[in-house]
Image: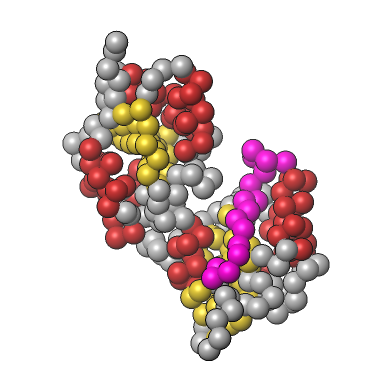
Amino acid sequence: MKAYGKVYIVGIGPGGMDHMTPAASKAIGDSSCIVGYKTYIDMLGNIGEGKEVLSSGMKKEVDRCQKVIELAMEGNTVSLVSSGDCGVYGMAGIMIQLIQESGEDIEFEVVPGVTAANSAAACLGAPIMHDYVTISLSDLLTDWELIKKRIHCAGMGDFVTCIYNPKSKGRQTQIEEARDILLQYKSTGTPVGIVRNAKRDGQQTVVTTLEEMLEHDIDMMSTVIVGNSTSYIKDGVIVTPRGYRI
């Protein structure tokens, strides 16, 4: 029986060693090959020195995973990296699916990381102390009508809502529609935090309201957190009380 290598599916966190878990750092260190989206590979800095590093651009996710399988079948230990957590809009799902469909007995391990929602929340104070949902506004893989239905449900349930992929060059109006849907359920003064490059170089943080959020710059590097009916702004930070008596 042929001895295959191992696949680590690694969440590297927001970027930089200071917010990467020791387990993620060890998995990458134990690997002979690193595969990932070019932007995420660049975030690793010197950690990839001395290893085979393969990077590619957007919309090449399946190709990257197939290359990982090929490398593992050659006996290599491979780290497939995603920013944030690899199981939250990351590479874990498609990588596991392709390993299973290959029919090969390739060992894999999912290594979690700090999510964009967690990173952005830390920049804003404590906005996700109570129940929250994450919704991506990218309609590349999910129908926009279904995304809108999910936004309605988040608003109806009074969830704190963490919005990923809010806006891109080719997708300008979805964040406006999302805001308008949430206004059907939330007050105009609901706290909103907009964090660009959370816990990375160039971090920018805005604390605003649901009514005024579209007056601020929002792009694909931004995470938007919309509070619930109890969230408030004080001293420049957002807090969503969990209900403790104080």
Could you tell me residue 69's position as x and y percent? Answer: 39, 23
Residue that lies at the very extreme toward the front in this rendered image: 245
Could you tell me residue 10's position as x and y percent? Answer: 37, 42
Q: Going 55% across and 60% down the picture, which residue do you hit?
A: 223
Q: Residue 114: say if magenta.
A: no
* Residue 111 visible here: yes
Q: Which picture quadrant has residue 15?
A: bottom left
Magenta residues, start to end: 128-143
Predominant SS of the magenta segment: loop
Q: Nearer the viewer, residue 106 or 125?
A: 106
Q: Which of 218 and 144 is in front in this view?
A: 144
Q: Residue 129: say if magenta.
A: yes
Residue 224 sits above or below residue 146 on the image = below
Q: Going 46% across and 31% down the picture, which residue do you hit?
A: 95
Residue that lies at the very extreme toward the right in this rendered image: 184
Q: Nearer the viewer, residue 228 or 194?
A: 228
Q: Which picture quadrant has residue 177?
A: bottom right
